[in-house]
Structures are given as C-alpha cells and as structure tokens.
Amino acid sequence: MRPAPAPLTVAPVSSSPFLALGAEIPWSSLDVAEVVPAIDALLVRARSDVAAIGASEADDYARVLGALEHALEPLSRAMAVLSHLEGVASTPALREAYGAVHPKVAEFYGSLPLDPALYARLVAVERREAEARTLDPVRRRHLDKTIADFRRHGAELDEAGKRRLAEIDVALAQVTHRFSNHVLDATNAFELLVEDEAKLAGLPASARQLARAAAEAKGKPGWRFTLQAPSVMGVLTYLDDAAIRRAVWEAYNRRAAEAPHDNAPLVVEILALRAEKAKLLGKADFADLVLEDRMAQRGAKAEAFLQDLAERTRAAFAAETEELRAFRRELEGPDAPPLAPWDVGYYAEKLRAARFEFDEEELRPYFADERVLRGLFEIAGRLYGVRFEEKPETTWDPAVRTFAMFDGERALGHFYVDLYPRENKRAGAWMASLLTAGTDADGSVVPNVALFCANATPPSGDGPALLTHDEVTTLFHEFGHLLHHMLSSVEVRSLAGTNVAWDFVELPSQIHENWAWEREALDLFARHVETGAPIPDALLEKMRRARTFRGASQQMRQIGFASLDLALHRRFDPAAALLDQARALMAPFAPTPLPERFAMITSFSHLFSSSVGYAAGYYSYKWAEVLDADAFSRFLERGIFDPETGKAFRETVLSRGDAEDPMALFVKFMGREPALEPLLLRTGIPVAVA
C-alpha cells in the first residue's frame, strides 16, 4: 500500500500549480481553494492572448493557428486536471469549485468561433494559403478543419444568434454537470444489506467477499450490495434470490429518476438546448450538427448503419431469446413464469454453464490484477516496440500507480492507472489525456501524460484482486485508447492522439480487446494465482466457444442504446413523457418486456454528463467494431505478434491521430474499405454466402 498523499497546502494564486502545469503534476499541492481564482486568472490570460491574435494583422499559420494553440494550452491543461479530479476524488468543495468554473470555461471556448476578429485572421490565413500553398498537409488539414469548425459553431451568425449560442453553451455546461452529479449521488445513496447468509445462495465466493468488505467498511453487519458495477453484476448473474435480483436491477435502472436526484427534467432540458443549438446553426437536428465532422457525417447515415446491422442480427437475437425461455422451462417446468429483465443475466449464465460447462468464475484465479497489468505492457512491447517502468509518485489516491513509457531509450511520457471503485469516483471505465506532447510557447518540450481508470473488482484481504475476463477486456480496451494517445507523432496538438472523429476513436481501443482471447497473448499473463499454471486447454476452449454465446443479444443491446440516442436527438417529442418515449424506443431491442418504471435514460452518462460527449454518437461503438473486427483479421492472418503488422498499425493508425482522413488511414492499413462480415462472424451471426 502506498503512503497517503501529503496534506493539501494553501498558496497564493500567483504561485498556484494550476497556473503552469507541466509533465510532473504536483497532485498533493493542488488546493481546491485555488481552483476558482486560478481558473479565472487563466481565463483572463487566454482572453488577452486571443484578443491579441485578433487585433494583429497576421495572416500566416504560425502567428494565428500556432499562436491560438499556445494561447489555449494552459487553460486546457488546468481544466483537464480539474475535470479528472472531480471524477476520481470528488468532494463537496471540489464539486462546488468545478461547478463555478466549468460554465465560465465553456462560455469562453464557445465564444471563440463567435469572435469576428479571430475568425477574420483565420480567413486571412486561408486566403494567403490559397495563393502561396506553403503549408504541409497536416497543418493544411488543421487550417481547413478549424475554419469548418468555427463555421459549424456560429462564426457566421448575426450578433443576436451569437449571443443566444453563447447562452446555450453555458446552460449546457451547467445542466450536464448537474446530471453527472445526480448520477454519482444516486449511485452512492443506495445500499441493500443482507444479514441472512441463506439468501446469498448462488453467489460466488468472490462476490460474497466483496459484499462483506463493503459492509465492514461501513461498520455494518452482514453483506452490503451497492450500485457499483462489480456488485451489480455479481447479483444479477449469480444470485438465486429473485427478489433481491429485482431490487438491485430496478435500483440500478432507476438511478437518478427520483427526487432529490431526479435527472428526467434535466434530460428534457438538455435535449431542448441541443435541438435549439442545431436549428440556430442551420442543421435539421443535433445529430446532423455533431456528425458533420465524423465518418458518418449525418444522422440519417448513422441510423441506416444501425438499421442494417439490426436487421442482420434480428433473427439470431430472436432465436437466442427463445432458447433462454425454453431453457428456463426445462429447469422449472412448463409453467415457469416468463422471463423478467432481472432474470436474463441469471438464466443466461446458467445456460452458458450447462451448454459449455463453463463458469466465468473459473477464470478469476488466472487474472490477478498485477499480472494483467504486466500483460498489457508485454503485449504492447511485442507489437509496438515500447517498454514501461513504474515511477514512485504521490497521486490523488494511494491505490493509483504511475508508469513511464519508452520507445527504446526515448521517453514518450507517463500515465496513471486507477483500477478500483471508490465512493468519490464516478462509475465506468475511461481513458483521458492530461497533456499532449509538443513544444510550449516558451520553447520547452512537454511529453504525453495520460491515465486510464476502471471500476474493477478490488482486492479482498491480503491477496491480489482477481478479475473477471470481462474486466480484463475492459482494461485492454482503455489501454488501447492510452496507446493511441501515447504513441502519437502528430506535431499539431489539436490533431494528435485521440483527437479524432468519435466514430474512429474506438478502433484503437476495441481492436486491443482481441488479444485477451488469444492463447499466445494470454500465456504471457494469465497464470493461476496459486500454482502459476496457464489456463488449461479445456477451460480456454470453453471460454472461446462461449465468446459468441448470446452474441446477437449483446449486439442488439448496443444497437438499442445507439438507436435510442439518435432517436432522442433527432425526433424527441417534448410534449410526451420522457421515460415513456425512452422505454418505447428500447423495447424492440430488449429480450423481455420493460417495466413501466424503467428509467435507464436518467443515468445514461455517455449522453448527458457533458455538453456533447457521446450524444448522437453512441453508434460509434458498433461502427468502430466493424473497423476493429476487420482490421484484426490482418493480425490473425499474419500472426497476432507479427512485428510488421504491429508496425503498420502503429504507423497508419496509432501514431497518426487526425493528421489524415480516418477512412484513408484505415485503407492504408487494410488496403481497402471496411467489410461488415468479420464482425458478424466474430459475434456468431451467420453470414450469407453470395
């Protein structure tokens, strides 16, 4: 266990670390009392620098776009660190401070495209470049995309339109922040205590230990279940007691649906603001607005993609659903009740165990957290020629670790790993960049700094954390995002790393999940916690055969979320009840009828916890799955550790950020545009032969 962070110190704002963050972030010196004055000071500085660019007569790239990047960098870094802390080490004071500055920062960034003087400088650069043609392709792309982005965000609106757009951006920043807080508060407000051990029948030892530790941490008897993902999944997958399963399922799917954390009116407000913004900017709906700069380009094209995928999946989905119903009747007789939503995971796990003689819990002993982490590093080393060293550093929590990344002897930067749930940490798993490598205005060179977080099963007692295979694939996913950032070689920060189209950004993350299924990769890290033996052939074969188990159902679930997202952002009816609309939209993709009180929309943080986020973009997961399944087929053909294939993927995708059109990058790697069939085959869905 690492020592606790040093006490926070108070310093005058003139010397606050927030004002000049570099690669070595002084986490223990970041004082919440400095947040508001420091961010205000950075805003004043950024506004002044931007005003100077606009007031100049500059018409060249370096003095306009280059200067603009330098002007925004200190504020961007401070907000990245602050936003991160608010998500992983939340306190009432930090939440209040973040809530005070976030709208002001959103207003500032929203004001940039509305600044006529700044826009005039960009147009001047565009005009000069059209005549001189001196820019290299990457900077030319940066110029073109920046001007298009300014126009898409109101640069050519009249003054009244610009004022209203600025008001909308501030309002969205405020209301989405409240949404996020409500989800965290509602998640933490729930607990279910069980004191009769007989009611835990079916629950594996790992889940019991987790629940016992949760109760002990609160000084309570028995076993305590929460709405943190490891707790919820254990109950819904294994617990025999249907009443408890129902209570947990309903609580999880009604998070932030009731006072004092009711998000339903906030969702309606967010949708209205986004729709108004789209109309103001000349778009039919919010989907068309945000997708213009993505691979799909329009909401209709994204919906057509989902509809095509759904139609190819529907027959297999129906067959899987009927198979699960029939299996319950086999177990309980012809009068077995219909499946309810809280029954699906439970009976699916029993069916999987019966069909494949496979229990996911059998794999836990092979996935000790430290070995998994080292496996990620070893695989990246073999594929991309990089290596990792742990750094002793005090961070935001004693459980967080820091690692440096090297390409040979060249330092690429460092990153943080935060794996386990805490009450002051938001749910889910994610990667975030804190600094993007480049040269600062003063000439100093800054490396990449990033992090990835999860909410995986934590250690219990003195032993290591033993992860599920699903948690392992989640870590591979987030690590793929991290590699995309850390391996970037794009000089223009705005186009570097993960600053790519949202329907392309999941390719580097999702493709790396594939290594968690391959024997050659698993043998590098999947060793029994007691014996050190690799996963036995029979168990691995069962695991791999079970991979496509209910694959169509999982795919329909994701298509359902994505379809709900696009429908709300294209056709939401403010006169009808939000929860009724959301339930009706999700119903065709659910294996059971959804209860009237179904309210998952009120905790759908991907869509509503930030001004844009995955709004109108949740389809990106499936879009990128098509890309990743197809791209991984090249590794399967040539060897999953083939150095030439790894080098090609690094050079054409991981290192290139948004320096080129994403489809062009994919074609450079594969030699053709993507095919849908590899995803269907990987999911276990029959593919018609032409």
Image (tube, helix red, strand yellow):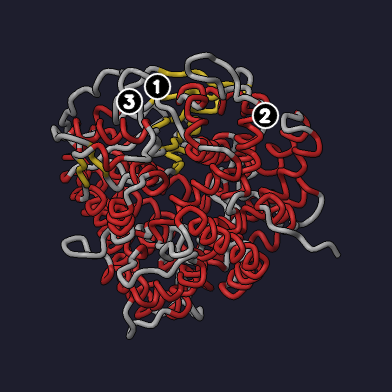
Question: Which residue occupies 41% across, 68% down?
Answer: 114
Mark 3 residue type? Ser
* Spot occupied by residue 93 in the image (x, y as percentages of width and height): 16, 44
Mark 2 residue type? Arg
Q: What distance separates the C-alpha of mark 2 from that of mark 1? A: 23 Å
Question: Is residue 275 shown above or below 455?
Answer: below
Closer to the camera, 355 or 520? 355
Q: Residue 519, labelled with which disc?
A: 2
Question: Which residue occupies 61% across, 22% down?
Answer: 524
Query: Residue lying furthest top in this view?
Result: 531
Residue wearing tag 3: 460
Q: What distance separates the C-alpha of mark 1 from that of mark 3? A: 7 Å
Mark 1 residue type? Pro
Toward which corner of the image does residue 690 lie, by quadrant?
bottom right
State left or right for residue 35 relative to residue 514.
left
Q: Residue 409, labelled with which disc?
A: none
Question: Is residue 76 shown above or below 26?
Answer: below
Label 2 element class: helix
Residue wearing tag 1: 464
Query: Residue lying furthest bottom in this view?
Result: 575
Q: Is residue 127 visible?
A: no
Q: Tag 1: Cα neighbours inside 10 Å, few (<14), some, or many (≥20)?
A: some
Label 3 element class: loop
